[in-house]
Structure formats: structure tokens, C-alpha cells
Image (cartoon, rainbow, N blue to C red):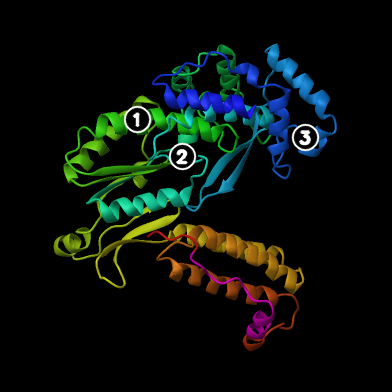
Amino acid sequence: MGTKLERIMEISATTPKPEFTSLYHLINIEMLKQCHKELDGSKAVGIDKVTKAEYEKHLEENLTNLVRKLKNKAYNPLPSLRVFIPKANGKKRPLGIASYEDKIVQLAVKKILEAIYEPRFLHCMYGFRPNRGCHDAIKEVQYQINNRCINYVVDADIKGFFDHMSHEWMMEFLRLYIKDPNLLWLINKYLKAGVMTDGVFEESEEGSAQGNIISPILANIYMHNVLTLWYKFAIIGRTTGHSFMAVYADDFIAGFQHKEDAESYYALLRERLRKFNLELEESKSRLIEFGRYAESNSKRKYGRKPETFDFLGFTFYCGKGRKTGNFCVKLKTNRKKFSMKLKQTKEWLYQNNDLPVKELIAKLNKKLVGHYRYYGVSHNMNKLSSFLHYVQRYLFKVLNRRSHKKSYLWNGYIDMLKVYPLAQPKIYVRLF
């Protein structure tokens, strides 16, 4: 199976406009078994409540029936279970959880779509791609502004991107390379499967439920056609100076050397998105002066520091190198993300305050290291240390709630941390 997908990838990479006419047959028992093997059995279950372990008890029979239904086009994916998770701004993000059998098929479709599109996605796309991630996108933004005369940044946010992707446009984009009507039929079935919220079924007229396995690759295909190709062929040719774009799923940043280029792009961006059923979140989208001259210009014009922008959980701000004193783009944990992560850690500590101290701190350390691994980038040590400081105080309060008498005075608490130390901040990602 791997060889066939590699061949598809090779054709896609070497053919100007490939057309794939026979793909549906690749979703066979062999591929579905591999997908079942790769799926994480600890993930939340869909509306049918079937777990990986339960499905595996009759795996051969289940997959044989699944292949038969797919072959006869009798397969109907179940609606996704909609749940809500908190966002940094206090709102909630809707997530869709597919049934286990649907996850298997979705993973198979994802593998085929990745083989076709991965060679065609532009370098500026970083989200949900093999061997790429958030830190790569962050490095690109930092490098471009530091080294390529970028003076203006368009910080744009798409309103409800995953919820408002047009099904009609999505299918049009897929038809450019996929000529297999059966695979297109299956993808359309997923788009139209609907969601179940608190036991109430809702039809899906647009969008793709965020959280489903297939949604990230569909989102990338949509952004590839709507945004990155448009930037490459329509925007770059208009600009008179340097420019760049970095895209992570529906998050993106564009930078320009000249203000008129940035203003033109920003105006055209609204029209471009509107054409494809999308719109900017105006309260979160703006054009700012940012770069090596922003600080002096801002002080001269407005008597204040230059503006900052947020991207992937970090706030980018104009700073100076410690040794040279020259302009340098610096990063720190976004204030809202910082507060949300602290709140989550505090709640977790109170929920688990009955654990033995050794076990509690061992589990807490895993959370701390996870936080450091993401936010541990160059220039952000102060925010990491601040996060640990607050966590230490929360832990002290939690341990002293175990009885009516205080378990620890502060000096005793410090002595205890020498025996069971908390994980210390560390820079994991160097930006230069």
C-alpha cells in the first residue's frame, strides 16, 4: 500500500496538472487494517460509543462488512458528536468526534489526499503537514521580518473557518486533480454527514467539523486554493518590494516591505475570502507597522512603543539583540494563552489534590515539560519562569487544603521541593 501511495505522490510532484482516475480501490482491507492499527484507542468515542478495543474483537468481520458497504456505496458515515472546549478568549471551540469506523475510513482517505496534495502545497504552509509544525512557521515569520526588510504586517483572522468552508467550492477544488467519482462521492458523504449536539441532529450545509481526522487535510486544500496560490500568482506580481506569507491551517501572517503593498493586499484579501464563503474577523484583523523602523517611527509619531501581533500562541514584538543592540524580533507567550494555561493547571491541581505528593508532582512535571516544549522558544524564558512561579504558588495552596491544619509552612514547602523538584524552564527551540 505504501508503494502505491508513493507512486501517487511521485506523479503529483512531477506532473504539471495530474489527473487521478482510479483511487477508490485503494481503500481495501489491507489499508483499513493499517489505519485501525495506527489509530489511538484512548481518544474520545463518537455517538455509537464504540471503542477501538470493542471494534477489534471482530476486526476481520467488521472490516469485511465495511469494504462491502464501501464497494456497494451503501456506506453512510454517522454524524459527528459535537463537544465544546474552552478558548483563550473565554469562548468555546466546537469539535467533532467521529465514530470509530468512520475514523478508520477517514484516515484512509486522508492518506490518499496527502499523497496527492503534499507535493503540491506551497512551502509557506506549515499546518498538519509531515515533518512541519508550529515552530517552523514561527521561525519563518521571525526570520523574514529580521532579515528581509519587512516593515508592515497584516495580522488577519478568518471568522469560523472550519465551520464555513463551502462544500461546493471544496468539491470543485478536489475535482481539479481527482477524477475518480467514487472517492469524490465518499468525501462528499463526510461533508454532509452532519453533527449531533446534545442529542439533536444538525445538517451540515457548510464546513467540516474540526476534530475529525479528515478535516485538517481538507482545510489545507481549501487554504491552498483560496489563499496561498492566490498570493503566489496574484499578489507577488503586484508588490514592489519584499513580502512573505506563513500559513498554519486557518492562521496566517503576511508581511510587506512597502505600506501600499500591504494596504492593497489587505483590501483584496477581504474580496478574495468573500468569494469563497469566508470573511475576516474584523475585530482581530489589522495592518500594523512592524519591523526595524517601527520603534523609532512609533515614538516619533505617537510617543509610544510599536504595536505587536499574535501568531500561534505567541506575541511578536520589536526588540533589540542583547549583544549587538540591533533590531530583533522577539517572542513571548500570548497573555490570553498564558492565563488559560495557568487556569487549566490550577484546576487540574485542585482536582487531583488527593494524590500522594510524589505522584502529584510527577504528573505535574509532565504538564510543565509539555508547556516548556511548546513555549520554550528563544527570548521567552521570562514567561516560562513566571509560569513556574505561579504554578509553585498554586501547588503550595493545594497541598495546604488537604487538612484543617496547614500541611506546610513556606520554608517546609521549599524543603519538600528539594526532594520532589518541579521541572525547570528550558529553551527547546532556538530561533537563530
Q: Is residue 107 above or below residue 258?
A: above
Rounded to the nearest angstrom, the CA distance separating label 2 from label 3 is 30 Å
Q: Earlier in the sequence, mark 2 or mark 3?
A: 3
Residue 291 is situated, as x and y percent measured from the top left of the image, at: 24, 56
Q: Which residue is the site of mark 3? A: 50
Mark number, residue 249: 2
| Quarter where residue 69 is shown | top right
Mark number, residue 229: 1
Q: Residue at x 54, y 24 (%)?
A: 7
Of 35 and 280, the residue lying toward us: 35
| Quarter where residue 254 is shown | top left
The stretch in magenta equals 413-427
Residue 94 is situated, as x and y percent measured from the top left of the image, at: 56, 40
Q: Is residue 417 above or below residue 257?
A: below
Residue 165 is situated, as x and y percent measured from the top left of the image, at: 46, 29
Asked whether the viewer can see residue 4, the reply is yes
Rounded to the nearest angstrom, the CA distance separating label 1 from label 3 is 41 Å
Of 270 and 2, the residue lying toward us: 2
In this rendering, position of residue 255 left or right of residue 203: left
How many numbered circles are shown? 3
In this rendering, position of residue 375 left or right of residue 286: right
**Label 3 CA crowd tier, 10 Å (few <14, some 14–19, many 20+):** some
The residue mark sitting in front, 1 or 3, is 1
Task: Identify the amino acid type marked 1.
Answer: Leu
Task: Identify the amino acid type marked 3.
Answer: Val
